[in-house]
Image: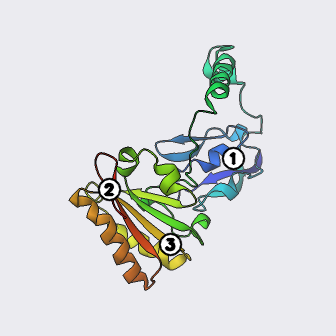
Amino acid sequence: MKRTVIQIDEEKCVGCGLCISACHQDALQLIDGKARLVSDSYCDGLGKCLPKCPTGAMTLEEREAKGFEGPAPREEQSGCAGTAVQEVSQASSLQETTQFQRPVSQLRQWPIQIQLVPPNAPYLEGSHLLVAADCTAFAYANVHEDFMKNKVTVIGCPKLDSADYSERLTEILQQNNIKSITVLRMTVPCCGGMTHAVTTAMRNADVMIPWQVVTIDVDGSIKEV
């Protein structure tokens, strides 16, 4: 039969997973880093996942497809009747007993890798930007509350990645009214690439906004502000 179902442009998809959480029919899964339609019969064609996609990778397409039936019951998907329900119940109980102890995540968007963040993502407009080296989140225990709170976070490692971060950061600055930039780096010399990328991006974008560099030592202490 001919009906409307989701179409995904794999080249535009960055694997953020936001569409998956928006789909109430379990029609989408993240496979090999890309969002994919599990089955035509799971897709209701309403397109509730479309607004969540930051890159415009998802569209509605009218084509030959299976009739909408909705997802299989949870126990059938797991292959063990009752097991899935039991696991969910146990997880809920654990969450209830630990939620008051668990720190609150201050992550406001996904993806966070510099090269994967779309320069035109709506969450960037008017934001305060945190440009953090990968290792800082492990060295500094309270990174969420002290640095990520009320900021859009992008991360990278100039030593491991071959990409020039300044190019993507330039695009972000050119296309958005960024209010400020905080560079969070380690004391190790290679982390100087994060600061260099930000200063180069501001120069290339011809913008000068409030910015600061915070340096974390390997013992977790702040060395420079």
Residue 107 image position (x, y, % from top left): 55, 51
For mark 3, give the secondary structure. strand
Q: Which residue is mark 3?
A: 180
The image quadrant that residue 150 belongs to is bottom right
Q: Residue at x 44, y 66 (%)?
A: 182
Quarter of the N terminus within the rendering: top right
Residue 55 image position (x, y, % from top left): 57, 62
Q: Earlier in the sequence, mark 3 or mark 1?
A: 1
Amino acid type at image mark 3 = Ser
Where residue 157 is drawn, which disc sits there?
2
Amino acid type at image mark 2 = Cys
Is 181 on the left-hand or right-hand side of 28?
Answer: left
Residue 72 image position (x, y, % from top left): 71, 27
Residue 143 image position (x, y, % from top left): 46, 50
Colour convention of the picture: rainbow
Q: Nearer the viewer, residue 80 or 175?
A: 175
